[in-house]
Amino acid sequence: MTRDPGQIEIFTAPADVASALATLFVEEARRAIAERGRFAVSLAGGTTPKAAYALLAGLPAARALDWRAIEIFFGDERCVAPDDEQSNYRMARLAFFDAVGVPARQVHRMRGEEDPPRAALAYRDDLVATLGPQPRFDLVLLGVGPDGHTASLFPGGDPFADDAALVRAVYAPTQGQWRLTLTPRVLNGARTIAFTVEGAGKAAMLKTVREGSYEPSRYPAQSIAPHDGRLLWLVDRAAAGV
């Protein structure tokens, strides 16, 4: 099948990727609030997003945003308590929620400390109550694992399984851990999807996901293709192989 690999932007170093991601966040937030009165974003975990969130905490442009008009969700979460060091919510809170003063009611965290299937249903209900029955994010942030996974969609299973559920509880055997994840149906509805990838260790996988044969069960990141939006890849030179 013919696929649009999306637009790739190559930066010198991981710090430059993080800076570009922070700038993109502010730009998309400004545009969404100006045009629609609200900015809905799905955050990712990982090293580069964490660095971008820390940059947001110090950006005057970010502090000037109307955070009351911003709805923050998460693309996935480990099934741990919110104060656990593995928690994406904890990472984002420490990196910028507290520093910027994001109102607690604007942050929609996945309740990883609860029973996974029930937590997935609760998050779906929150998602639909906030963004409607066909939720559409203005910006979705994602990464790619060295095994080709994205969010908590892992190799070896159909990433489109239970797609209509919007949120799934999944068990990751390689991590020995339950996780919660948005499904491709939600992710692909976004106006903008931005992947960040860094390091030579991910160069081969980045090329495979973007240019290789379409095998989403083997490389779940290939399941991400916005229906009516743009797909961006923010990568460093090492990951781009240049």
Image (cartoon, rainbow, N blue to C red):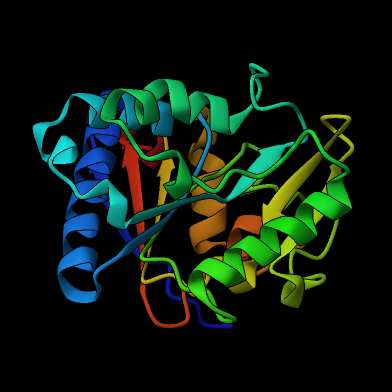
Location of residue 186 in the rendering, given as x and y in whole percent from the top left corner? 58, 69
165 vs 185, left or right, is right
Residue at x-position 36% and y-position 76%: 229
Examine the image and state in which quarter residue 81 appears: top right
Residue at x-position 34% and y-position 41%: 235
Examine the image and state in which quarter residue 164 appears: bottom right
47 vs 75, left or right, is left
Where does the N terminus fall, quadrant-wise?
bottom right
Note whether residue 219 is visible: no
Relative to residue 235, is residue 117 depicted above or below? below
Location of residue 225 in the rendering, given as x and y in whole percent from the top left corner? 51, 71
Residue at x-position 52% and y-position 74%: 135
Q: Which of these two is toward me, 177 or 143?
A: 177
Q: Which of these two is toward me, 95 or 161?
A: 95
Relative to residue 136, is residue 222 depicted above or below? above
Q: How many marks?
A: 0
Residue at x-position 74% and y-position 37%: 112
